[in-house]
Image (tube, grey):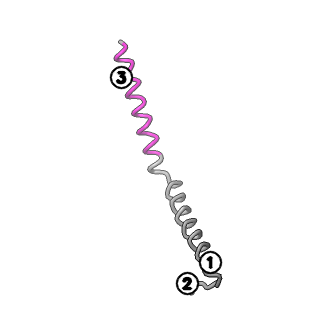
Amino acid sequence: MEFIGIGFLLVGVIALVLAVRYAIDTSKMITRMDAMLHEMRLLRKDIRELKDNKHIVDKKV
């Protein structure tokens, strides 16, 4: 009987982990966070370049 209970508990935990993982993978919030982190990295790089350069020049123009 103890093994059956442990088995059910194990199956339940695995099902919970799979459900949470699927919800995270399909969430649009993750893609938004990735885009935001990428933008922050670009901004940090630009700020570092501005500190090093002392001249403010827009490269994109």
| Residue 38 percent location from the top left of the image | 52, 65
| Residue 37 percent location from the top left of the image | 54, 61
Mark 2 surroundings within 10 Å by alpha-carbon count, few (fewer than 14), some (14 through 19), many (20 or more)? few
Q: Which residues are magenta?
A: 2-23
Q: Is residue 15 part of the magenta span, yes or no?
A: yes
Q: Nearer the viewer, residue 36 or 42?
A: 42
- Measured along the vertical axis of the image, is residue 37 above or below residue 47? above
Q: CA distance from mark 2 to mark 1?
A: 14 Å
Rendering quarter of residue 17: top left
Q: Is residue 57 part of the magenta span, yes or no?
A: no
- Measured along the vertical axis of the image, is residue 45 above or below residue 55? above
N-term-proximal mark, 2 vs 3: 3
Q: Looking at the image, is mark 2 or mark 1 nearer the viewer?
A: 1
Specify whether 12 is left or right of 60. Answer: left
Which label belongs to residue 10? none
| Residue type at numbered disc 2 | Lys
Residue matched to label 3:
7
Residue matched to label 2:
60
Rendering quarter of residue 61: bottom right
| Residue type at numbered disc 1 | Leu
| Residue 35 percent location from the top left of the image | 52, 63
Residue drawn at point x = 47 percent, y = 47 percent: 24
N-term-proximal mark, 1 vs 3: 3
| Residue type at numbered disc 3 | Gly
Secondary structure, mark 1, is helix
Residue drawn at point x = 39 percent, y = 18 percent: 5
Which label belongs to residue 50? 1
| Residue 18 percent location from the top left of the image | 41, 39
Q: Is mark 2 in CB contact (under 8 Å) with mark 3?
A: no
Q: Nearer the viewer, residue 12 or 48?
A: 48
Q: Is mark 1 in CB contact (under 8 Å) with mark 3?
A: no
